[in-house]
Image (cartoon, rainbow, N blue to C red):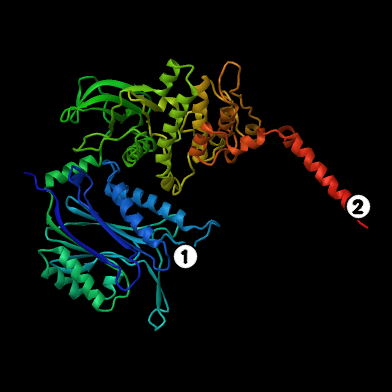
Amino acid sequence: MTAKLSVSIGQYSDKGRKAKNQDCHGSLIPKTSLLALKGIAITMADGISSSNTSHIASETAVKTFLDDYYCTSEAWTVKSSVERVMTSINSWLYSQTMSGEGRYDKDKGYVSTFSALILKNRSAHLFHVGDTRIYRLSKHGLEQLTNDHRLWVNEGTSESKSYLSRALGIEQQCSFDHQTITLSKGDVFIICTDGIYDFLPSENMINTIKQHSDDLHKAAVSLVKQAYDLGSDDNLSVQVVRVNELAEENQVNLIKQVEQLEVPPVLEARTEFDGYLILRSLHANSRSRVYLAQDKITGKQVVIKAPASDIEQDAEHLERFLLEEWVARRINNAHVLKADLAERPRNFIYTVFEYIEGQTLAQWALDNPNPSLEVVRGFIEQIAKGLNAFHKMDMLHQDIRPENIILDSSGTLKIIDFGSVSIAGLEETRNDSPATYLLGTALYSAPEYFLGEQGNIQSELFSLAVITYYLLVGTYPYDAQVARTKTLSEQRKLKYKSLLSDDREIPSWVDDAIYKAANPLPDRRQYDLFEFVHDLRSPNKEFINKTRPPLIERNPVAVWQGISFGLALIILYLLKP
């Protein structure tokens, strides 16, 4: 049997003498092939004491990292995967840290230190920002592997103080330390916060771990207790990790090959491919090829999407394809196509999705040119729920259209094709300018994209409104005029074609709701998707106030009574002596 990487982990955290524990730690040992492909992750975060929300920052950093790291592509190296995940986490924390005035709010600082240890095959990958520490205890003794990102003031005096010079959530872009070291069997790693190492001598750490070598949890508890007894006035958290077995060399070589995967060739029906049997081709264009396949182990039908060979030398498009896989794995929603996580090593770059038996919404619209308003409402509500799953992850789909929505046999709609998805945390840290070319489809893209602006939720709302319009009447609210407008002045002149007609039973307030959502100016649209969904079912206050007749028409008697009463008061006032 091939030897696999095996470790023992003990971890413990306590609030100590503080009222609240702002530390957070976590670890994950995969049970599938991800153990070899992605490794074992151990993480520690420590929120800053000056903020009453930093415990949220530390918890978010740890939990999000453990979720997102294992969703990244196997074709990425550990460093590439962690870099993207940490960048995304930092972006979210920074956006929460900034107050409404766009400045740092120390009382609401979503700031945290963060250290991650990834053990993969025969290597340890260390990622670090802040002042949590990672040590290694080996036959050579106890070695501190990380450097504290602290800025000292009045060092060496009784008034000396230190401040974090780097941490997650402080700056829009966060740089972190990274190093890779070779593992040896029996290596012990210790990750701890300053509540431990500021008070506990190295000898105590070494002796305690040796004393409890058969139970690392007891070792962790003992280290916390000792630091507390020695006067620690901070939260106390520690993780102890021992390497029991290393992966065999032949497995390491295989993983190195996986990190340098190639684009697969064009696949024909009945071809065996990485444990799948190709059944037929479903779709092909200049960017990708999509196949229906059967998993030879489970017998389940799946969809395999591979980048086209034409983009093999196009680093930007290939990177976008790999990001698409990350997106697919991160989102779990009934109205979004589900990715099928790999259970075995792969030899090429591709993504596996669930197979949906059904038709595109575009085909359904052709087959049903006169749908009922209620059916369309139901479809739009489903699409909105799917899009909202992207938005909750700080993502924009950016190419939502009937061709990218599948209707299955049970009537459930699922959003597909993540090739144009924008991930906020990564877009904000690009050193170059955002792409000026249109990622989505012109007929459904919001006007702001044609001005070279980046999209937002209101941009997705515009696309959803155009889909609503198209399903109801088979045409578009501005035809193809939006794509021809290159200035804000031209966009202001766009004329919306009303849905109202003697041939259609569509209430005027529904037409008004679609008109508002499809307004060329983003700030005039509804606030979010579900406000639009609500407006499709019930007239909003704005429409009611706009269409309500004057009071004199609704109740002329009351108006004249009011006028008469007012005149009477004036006459009485004038007759006063």
Query: Which residue occupies the extreme right position in the image?
Result: 577
Label 1: how many Cα within 10 Å (few below 14, some 14–19, many 20+): some
Q: Nearer the viewer, residue 355 or 280?
A: 355
Q: Secondary structure at mark 2?
A: helix
Which of the two labelled residues, at mark 1 and mark 2, occupies the earlier sequence position? 1
| Residue 422 seen by the camera | no
Q: Amino acid at mark 1?
A: Asp
**Secondary structure of residue under mark 1:** helix
Q: Residue furthest left?
A: 1
Q: Residue at x 43, y 21 (%)?
A: 362
Q: Is residue 560 left or right of residue 468?
A: right
Q: Position of residue 91 (x, y in %)?
A: 42, 52
Disc 1 target residue: 107
Q: Which residue was labeled with disc 2?
A: 574
Q: Nearer the viewer, residue 169 or 529?
A: 529
The structure residue drawn at horizontal position 81% and vertical position 42%, both measured from the top left corner, is 563
Tag 2: amino acid: Leu
Q: Residue at x 30, y 48 (%)?
A: 67
